[in-house]
Amino acid sequence: MAAMRDLPASEIPRHLSQRRPLLLSLPERETGDVLAKPVEDLQDIGPARAKALRGLGVATLGDLLEYFPRDYQYESEERPIDRLREGEISLARGEVTAVNYIAGGHGKARFEATLSDAGCEASAGVHRLSLVFFHGAYLRRQIHPGLLLRVRGKVQFFRGIAQMVNPKWEIVEPGTKAVEDAKFRAVYPASSRISSETIERIMSANLNEALAEVGEWFSPEILSRRKLMGRLEAYRAIHQPTDRRQAIAARRRLVYDELMLMQLGLAASHLMKMTKISAPILRIDKTLDRRIRARFPFELTNGQQNAVWQIVRDLKSGRPMKRLLQGDVGSGKTVVAVYAMLAAIANKMQAALLAPTEVLAEQHYLTLRNLLHGSQVKIDLVTSRTRRQSRGAVATRIAEGQTHLAVGTQALLQEGIEFANLGVVIVDEQHRLGVRQRATLSDKGVSPHYLVMTATPIPRTLALSYFADFDVSAIEDLPPGRKPIKTRWLRPGQVAQAWEFVCEQVRGGRQAYIVLPQIQEDGDDAKSVIGRMRTLAAGPLKDLRLAALHGQMTTEEKEQAMADFRDGKIDVLVATTVIEVGIDVANATIMVIDGADRFGLSQLHQLRGRIGRGLFSSQCILVADGATPGAEARLSAMLNTSSGFEIAEMDLRLRGPGEFFGIRQHGLPEFKLADLTSELDLLQLAKEDAQAIFADDPRLNNADHIHLRTALLSKFGQNLDLAQTG
Ligand code: ADP
Ligand code: MG
């Protein structure tokens, strides 16, 4: 994880100690806002095309410029028919010598025409080109023998005769010049309302105007060292390359730019935080340390111990902590977070704990209440389900400092909830929270300390990117006594085996979880908590004590069900993923995940982490058919590894970084071109170069960097601004 180190102090440029804002406000736009021109005002675009483009997310000239091809296609120049080649997209011309319409049922109707370019010796097969138009009834009135056509399409040979299916065609005069240039053309992601070709035409009509706005970001030295083409050239070449090699070089350049911009954004916000924003200095002495530890019913593991030391050092430093606490499911991250929160509270400051969902927030709330039972610490829960009036009351308590520890979702950061004196913020599972939320947290000039917990080890690719500005503490050991979990996969037809196993284990004194993907039955879908409870209680598990646990129950009902399970008054908990966190019953050694194909890989891993916590060996049974290749891959991964790290890498590969992070809702930067899972090398280069540029010209004031600076501010301006307030 060396990539995540802070810059050592010696690398912090001198001027930063003068506490000037790193980046000022947006520079004057020297070029006017040509790239902001709406598509309606562009060449070759009428209302219908404008609408179609907007449907593709292209609203301005700038969007158009960045509407990149998804592929390229080689098209040969116009050729005589006897020189057409299999598989090529070609232009050819000839006289129509025959037409035919075949009505054919079952949607097979087709119009056929034969072209010949051999004058009257049309009999010679090599000079014949056969055209097939499916659903071409209307062509009966347009194409007839004697016409001269020029056609374009992919050539295939059928019984020795060249053929094109659904070619483009036009009528030409005998004297029309042949098209002499072969062409390498872009293929754009298209829609039913606008074709790739139309987009290509629009692109060529407007590209020059857009390119006039493109400035170089980097010095010639960087370009030559990294073998990058110029930025302007790259934008032209990605749309209109002469050949595939040029297209690839263009893409590489623009991917580099994207990655670079992100690296600079991270570096800028990081340096600003380190230098401009101070954080409360917490006093943590031996007595306090002892008092906090006395709260925990166990000794800390080595991993927890190290994490606590690192955090204590951060909290005492006066600089905002920005630390990622990484540890597999069940490694005991919560107590480390609790340590940090109690340290803040003992220093007369508040602490906040943010979870990505309401259910998780509520689980944390219950866990903390339990752990801090009998202490002076006042805990409040805020989610969007908190009722209006009580929310007002909670907001007041938080604002007046009566609440010491607030647990919630992002609702905690919104809707005008102000903290009297926020010292420490803990975020659980950051990868589901976005950069924007991250920025909002350090809004007030004096930043709280900030700890992110994640059970999902951040894969190396992402560590180099999104989390590049975090310090990392990793808990690599598990609390003592954890046992490996055996995992099995049963098909739905074999599910009776699972119930038998549950019965047998309960008779032996153990307890079980049965997890389902939804609460209520939905049509004919029986994979629900309510439905399963009913069938199990009536049949396979009728002698056992069952209870349901799901998100529609009230907090009290849930608390009750969990307490009963913990106290052994319940044998089997039939639940949704609410049990993903916060439940910890060492005697529960069986987990049946029914409908396992419906869960994501990380979620399955997280769920499985609920068992294997006691003296007895544990078993996880996945019930599913491998309905899709994706489901198959997830389930196999579960059988083959119990390493959270491998699972996370696999999950990233299966889902891509976008979904992995739940990008859209949470505003993480998305790449138009870069693919973090395969472009690691370029990312590494961009990172090195970004650090060099930043060390040299952190305010990007250098004339060479003017375009880069504008781009950086327009991409991250909001976040950078937030980070520098106060
Ligand atoms: P996670 O890292 O998945 O959030 P938790 O913080 O929920 O893990 O901890 C998992 C369980 O392990 C909790 O019930 C907790 O009480 C227990 N635990 C944590 N640390 C220790 C320890 N040092 N010794 C024994 N049990 C521990
Ligand atoms: Mg946890």
Image (spheres, helix red, strand yellow):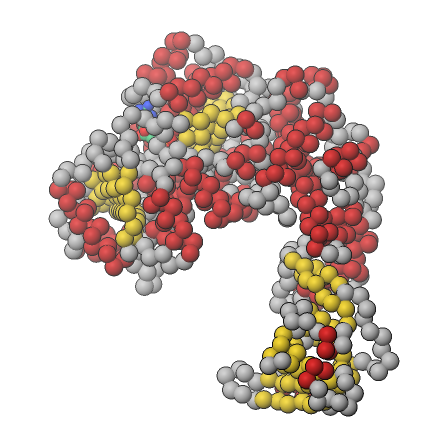
Residue 178 is left or right of residue 227, and the answer is right
Q: Position of residue 482 (x, y in %)?
A: 28, 30
Q: In the picture shown, does residue 513 fall above or below 443?
A: below
**Camera-side residue of 12 and 187:** 187
Residue at 49% x, 15% y: name it. 313
Q: In the picture shown, does residue 336 fall above or below 231?
A: above
Q: Position of residue 172 (x, y in %)?
A: 80, 80
Q: Position of residue 678 (x, y in %)?
A: 57, 44
Q: Is residue 109 visible?
A: yes
Residue 217 is left or right of residue 672, and the answer is right
Residue 73 is left or right of residue 336, and the answer is right
Q: In the picture shown, does residue 123 fall above or below 413?
A: below
Q: How many marks?
A: 0
**Camera-side residue of 584 and 259:** 259
Residue at 15% x, 38% y: name it. 509
Q: Position of residue 607 (x, y in %)?
A: 34, 41
Residue at 75% x, 48% y: name it. 234
